[in-house]
Amino acid sequence: MTEVTVTPSTAFAQAEGGGAALDQVFGMSIATTVLTIGLLWVAYLHRTGRITWLARVGDVAAERLHRPSWAALPLVLFVVTILCAFFGFIWDVSLHIGRGRDEGPLANPAHYFILVGLFLLFVTGMTAMVLPRGEKPGRAAVRITRSWYAPVGGILIAGCGLYALIGFPLDDIWHRIFGQDVTLWGPTHLMLIGGAGFSLIGLLLLEYEGRKAREAATGEPVRDGRGMWLVRCFAFGGLIIGLSVFQIEYDFGVEQFRLVLQPMMITAAAAFALVAARIVLGPGAAVVAVLFAAGVRALTALMVGPVLGAPHNVFALYLGAAVVVELLALTPLIRRRVLFGAVAGVLVATVGMWLESLWIGAVYLYPWPTSMWPEALAMSVPVGIAAGACGALLARVLRSEGLPRPAIRRTIVIVSVLILGGSTANGLIATVPENATATVALTEAGAADGRTVTADVRIEPADLVGDDPEWVSILAWQGGPGLGNGFVTDRLERTGPDTFRSTTPVPVDGTWKTVLRVQDGRTLTAVPIFLPADEGIGAEETAAPETFTREFVPEITLLQRERNFDHPAWLFGAASLVVLVCSLLLVAALAWGAGRISRYAGGLPAPAEPDPSPADPKPTAVP
């Protein structure tokens, strides 16, 4: 029986398998520092009145969007920023699937788009904070100095951008300690995508602050035309995209966690974003938002796949969930915002996900089996209720309707975080069967692109795989340019109670990593078919002879082959806890920002603020 070689910890001292080369780390740090100093200098010159061009650019945006410059210019910048980062992100994931790990952060062209996008995200928030000069940008603005106030939305966008940017150096440190955890759900990876995704909430709040400030300046409500209504719908579509990035592994067909998590994540994104969109913008907004999101995702998939020659991806459509929300909004329940959100969440998690499953079954590699639905509903329904209620709270802020009492709204947010965390934790529970094996007989397929084979598989014990598993498949990935752009998946055909057969040839040479994967309920396991020798991580080759029998192992040891498991158990948990705390602080900051804006900018009387006293040189922040 061939064994899989476990990577020794000493191998991760090499930059190739355990972090970026130091010259690239230093180069990126120096470049970022220089750019930051330059931008801070521009901000100083603007704040002191020594330059006027930034204000003039802001005035042009303000005239076009009918918002103050400190809201209008960041809105324009944000569109460029988030599209740049999202394109880079999809391309980066696709490159890793097709080609494996990078030679370094600067060797991957997609990283430039991500870095520029995230840096500009931070700049966008700072622009909103820096632009107001000689004015208070809305009643909810936070005092920075005695004469400098910053809009809450700008602070939140800058905070999200900074949170994402911090993920880059932390990611390198993470890889040096724990190796290359080749998964989107690595803790530092979640910082990168989470900061960008949640920044959409800050954008919606900033746009609202700008609208209310304009109303206060003109003394009459802002009446936007159809064009601005579409722009605001597109902002909610962007929120859908931002919240859907957590599902990207499923979109590419290389999910490393149980399939039951996918409908739960779709439910969370749909219930939160679509409930808020429908309440804020009225009939049709939820449908327009998902059509915009689908258009952006389709264009990005086209660019990354056929145009750039990387593995293609599909995406959740969300149209069924949008229709469900729109229909429910035709009832009187729409007037009871939080209850509407909760009921909409239930319908999204049930009817909406059933409609979504039709799309999943048509375009995804792994449709949702009937056997998965009981657990999926048990996870998705509570998450849908929580996400819908939170979406309704955001909508009440953006409609100047105020929020429920602090005890109620805080309870909703805290319970929602606990529900989402508990459901995610349940979805991450996976078991590996003991004394289970797969006997594989390979038949040469004779393809031109290296050695390719078909497989006949017998699994023991015979009852390991039930009648309706999530998948029994062979995954071959990271093979580089050529066959399938470096990515091939074969869903095996069942030929007996414990036997399966290939439906397409798979590669077993070169740099390909080819594994047999099984997921059935909580069982998530795999068997190596072929793994190349890898000097960068000190791994030997796992050959693919004509016939072999191998034990099932934890799938993570194969799909995350570059990961280092030779460290104290508490270290990974402690590091993950630090990232979790940072993430919770980001959620708390967004909740604080929404609450502050509702309290001060939503048409309610603003509490009096004490004038700054010369005797007290320290600025006093508005609570």
Image (cartoon, rainbow, N blue to C red):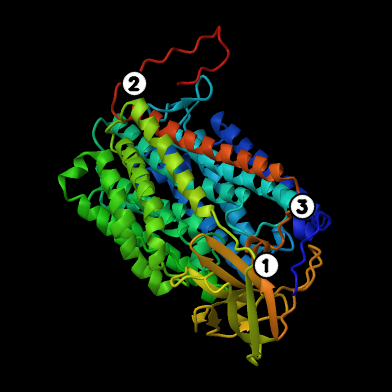
Q: Amino acid at mark 2?
A: Ala
The mark nearer the N terminus, 2 or 1, is 1
Tell me the distance, in whole angstroms, between the alpha carbons under discs 2 and 1.
Answer: 55 Å
On screen, residue 358 versus residue 335, left or right, reads right
Which residue is the site of mark 3? 566
Question: Disc 3 on helix, strand or loop?
Answer: loop
Residue 191 at x, y percent in the picture: 58, 47
The mark nearer the N terminus, 3 or 2, is 3
The residue positioned 28% from the left and 38% from the top of the image is 399
In this rendering, which labeled residue sits more in front, label 2 or label 1? 1
Tell me the distance, in whole angstroms, between the alpha carbons under discs 3 and 2.
Answer: 57 Å
Q: Residue furthest bottom?
A: 446
Residue 85 versus residue 315 in the image, above or below: above
Q: Which residue is at the front of the view, 470 or 152?
A: 470
The residue positioned 26% from the left and 56% from the top of the image is 324
Q: Amino acid at mark 3?
A: Asp
Q: Amino acid at mark 1?
A: Gly
Residue 322 at x, y percent in the picture: 29, 57
The crowd level at tag 2 (other Cα within 10 Å; few <14, some 14-19, many 20+) is few
| Number of numbered discs overlaid on the protein picture | 3
Question: Disc 1 on helix, strand or loop?
Answer: loop
Which residue is the site of mark 2? 606
| Res 569 label | none
> Is residue 264 shown to the viewer in this render?
yes
On screen, residue 505 versus residue 386, left or right, reads right
> The N terminus appears in which quarter of the rendering?
bottom right
Tell me the distance, in whole angstroms, between the alpha carbons under discs 1 and 3.
Answer: 22 Å
On screen, residue 174 versus residue 458, left or right, reads right
| Res 100 label | 1
